[in-house]
Amino acid sequence: METALITIAYLTSAVLFILSLRGLSSQETARSGNTYGMLGMAIAIFATVTADGINQYAFIAVALVVGALVGRNMAAKVAMTAMPELVALLHSFVGLAAVLVGYATYIAQTKTGSVFETEIFVDVFIGGITFTGSVVAYLKLKGSLSGKPLLLPGRHALNLVAALAAVGMGYWFTTFDGAEGLLPLALMTVISFALGAHLVAAIGGADMPVVVSMLNSYSGWTASAAGFMLGNDLLIITGALVGSSGAILSIIMCRAMNRSIVNVIFGGFGTGGGAPAPAAGSAAAVTGDIQETDVAEVVERLAGAKNVIVVPGYGMAVARAQHKVQEMTELLREQGVNIRFGIHPVAGRLPGHMNVLLAEANVPYDIVLEMDELNDDFPSTDVVLVIGANDIVNPSAMTDESSPIYGMPVLEVWKSEFVVMMKRSRGTGYAGVDNPLFVEPCTRMLFGDAGDSMDGIVGALRERSGS
C-alpha cells in the first residue's frame, strides 16, 4: 500500500479511536464505542500488514489467527469477577511486547544515532515497568499475593536509586552501537522489571482500582514510545490517547478517594515524612453486638419503604446476583418504590466494575448514580441494601485517623433508617479493615451468599405482588 494511503488509513483509525473513547465514557453509548474501536483497529492492522517492506505474511497470518483465538477464548470464559485481573494481565502483554519490539528494533539496527537509541531506551524502560507492575497487580487481584502493601524500609530511596541507575544505563547504552549496547540495555531492563514490581507491591488493596487505571495509562505511554521508536504515527496518537485518558481517570478516582495520585503511585510517598502508612488492621478495634436479620424482615421493610438505595460491591459480582437485583428493582418500582443505586468510584476491583454489572443486568441507567449524587439523600432513605460491599461504606474512613482508609469519602449509609448488610461473614473488606457499620443500631446483617439471599427476597416480593 502506498504511503499516502497508509497515512489516510492511520488518520481514519485515529478518529475512530477518539470516537471509541467518547462512546465508552457513557453506558448508553458504550456499545457504539466498542464498535468504533474494533473498526479502527481492523483498519490499522490492514494498513500495517499491507505496507511496503512487509512480506512475511505467513507468520503474520499465524500470529493474527492465534492471537484472535486466544483473545476470544479468554473473553468468552472470563467471569465478571475476574475481569479486573484479566485487564491487568492484558496490560502486561503490552509492556512485554514493547520490551521485545525494542530489542528486535535495536538488533535490526534500522536506524542509528543517540536519538534513536534514546527512543529504544524509553520504550524498553516504560515497557518493563508496565510488564512487571501489571503482573504484580494481576497476582494481587487474583489473591495469589496479599493485598497488603509491601513497605520496605527506605523504599522511596530504593526507587530513586533504581531510576538513577536506569538513567545511567541509558547513557551507557547510547554510547554503543551493535552488540556492545545489549549489556547496558539488558541491565536497564532488569532494573525496570524490579522497579515496576516494587512500585505496585507497595500499593495497598484499597487503591488497586486506581492502580489498574494507572497501568492502563502506562500501557498507553509504552505504545506511544514504541511509535516514536518505529516511526509509526498511529502508535504515537493511540498511545497518547490511552495514556492521557488513563491518567485523567486515575486522577478523578484519586480525588473521589481523597488520595494524592503521587501517594498512590509511590505507595504513600510524602505521608508522615515518608513513614509507612498505617498497616491494615491497625485501626481502632470494633466493639459491640451484631444484630442479624432474615429474608422475611428484609422483604417486610422493602415492601413498606418509599425510598430505597442499593449499594453494590465486589460480593455482588462474586455471587452473580446482579440479575436478581434487577428483578427486585422491577418489582419494587411496580409498587411505586423509589429505588436507586449508589456507586462508589472504587467499588469492585476495576473502574466502572459495578456499572458494567448493572448494565449487563439491564438496570436502567438513570437510577444508577454516583456517590456524590446520593450521599445527601441517605437521611431520607428508608432502607439501604449493601450487597457485598465493605470498605466503601465504612464509617471509620471519616472518624478513625488510625485507619488505613481514613480520609476516603464513603457512602454514608448509616444515616438512613435501616441498613441491610449482605455478607458471607463478618470478615473485613479488601483493605483489611474492620467495619463499625456492622454494630450500628440501624444495621442488620443478612449473612450468606448474596445470590441465595436475593433469590429469597425476589421470591417473597413476587408472592406479595401476586406475580
Image (spheres, rainbow, N blue to C red):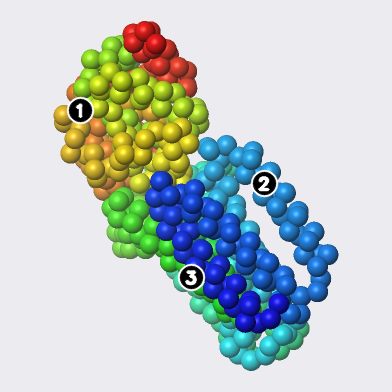
Res. 39 image quadrant: bottom right
Viewer-side residue, 402 vs 39: 39
Q: Position of residue 321 (x, y in %)?
A: 46, 26
| Cβ atoms under marks 2 and 3 closer than 8 Å | no
Place residue 97 in its image quadrant: bottom right
Q: Residues within 10 Å of mark 3 (few under 14, many from 20)?
A: many
Q: Residue at x 22, y 30 (%)?
A: 414
Question: Is 84 or 278 nearer to us in this picture?
Answer: 84
Residue kind at label 2, given as amino acid type: Arg
- x, y percent for residue 396: 26, 38
Image quarter (top left, top right, bottom left or bottom right) of the N terminus: bottom right
Residue 240: give its label. 3
> Neighbour class for label 2 at 10 Å: few (<14), some, many (≥20)?
few
Q: Which mark is residue 381?
A: 1
Provide the secondary structure element on which disc 2 rests: helix
Query: Which badge, 1 or 2, comes first in the chain's sequence?
Result: 2
First in sequence: mark 1 vs mark 3: 3
Q: Real-space Cα distance between discs 2 and 3?
A: 26 Å
Give the numbered dot on residue 72: 2
Q: Residue at x 68, y 88 (%)?
A: 111
Quadrant location of the C terminus?
A: top left
Q: CA distance from mark 1 to mark 3?
A: 44 Å
Give the amino acid type for the residue marked by disc 1 in the picture. Answer: Thr
SS for dot 1 = loop
Q: Is residue 10 above or below residue 258?
A: below
| Circles 1 and 3 in contact, beta carbons < 8 Å | no
Judged left or right of residue 359, residue 443 is left
